[in-house]
Image: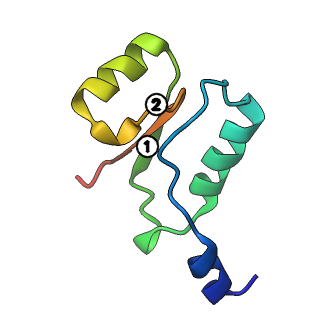
Amino acid sequence: MTFSELVRDRYSVRSYSDRLVEDDKIAAVLEAGRVAPTAKNIQPACVYVVRSPEAVGKLRAVCKMAFDAPVVLVVCADLG
């Protein structure tokens, strides 16, 4: 796939099923983020995997971008 095809074929998901995401899929996403390059290799990101319905509900109360996903990845950066 060329970059043009990738950009043309992309889409945004705004509705989700309530099916749980398998651990191996979450691990693959986290590993891709871990090995991705960062500026000056400072690696400032920390990713929290939020799975419990209570915690996901609290996130939805303060962040409209969680939609109805059963699992939310919260990406934080320590720039200090």
Q: Residues within 10 Å of mark 1 (few under 14, many from 20)?
A: some
Position above or below: 70 against 55: below
Q: Residue visible at 50% across and 32% down? A: 69
The residue beneath circle 2 is 68
User: Element at badge 2?
Assistant: loop
Q: Nearer the viewer, residue 61 or 51?
A: 61
Q: Residues within 10 Å of mark 2 (few under 14, many from 20)?
A: some
Where residue 51 appears, as percent x and y from the top left, is 53, 21
Where residue 10 appears, as percent x and y from the top left, is 58, 69
Image quarter of residue 8: bottom right
Position above or below: 23 against 78: above
Tell me how far mark 1 sits from mark 2, CA to CA: 23 Å
User: Element at badge 1?
Assistant: strand
* Residue 33 horizontal side relative to residue 38, left or right: right
Position above or below: 66 against 6: above
Residue located farthest toward the top when viewing the structure as drawn: 54
* Residue 15 horizontal side relative to residue 31, left or right: left
What's the amino acid at mark 2?
Asp
The residue beneath circle 1 is 46
Q: Residue visible at 57% across and 55% down? A: 33
What's the amino acid at mark 1?
Cys
Where residue 70 appears, as percent x and y from the top left, is 54, 26
Where residue 57 appears, as percent x and y from the top left, is 36, 18
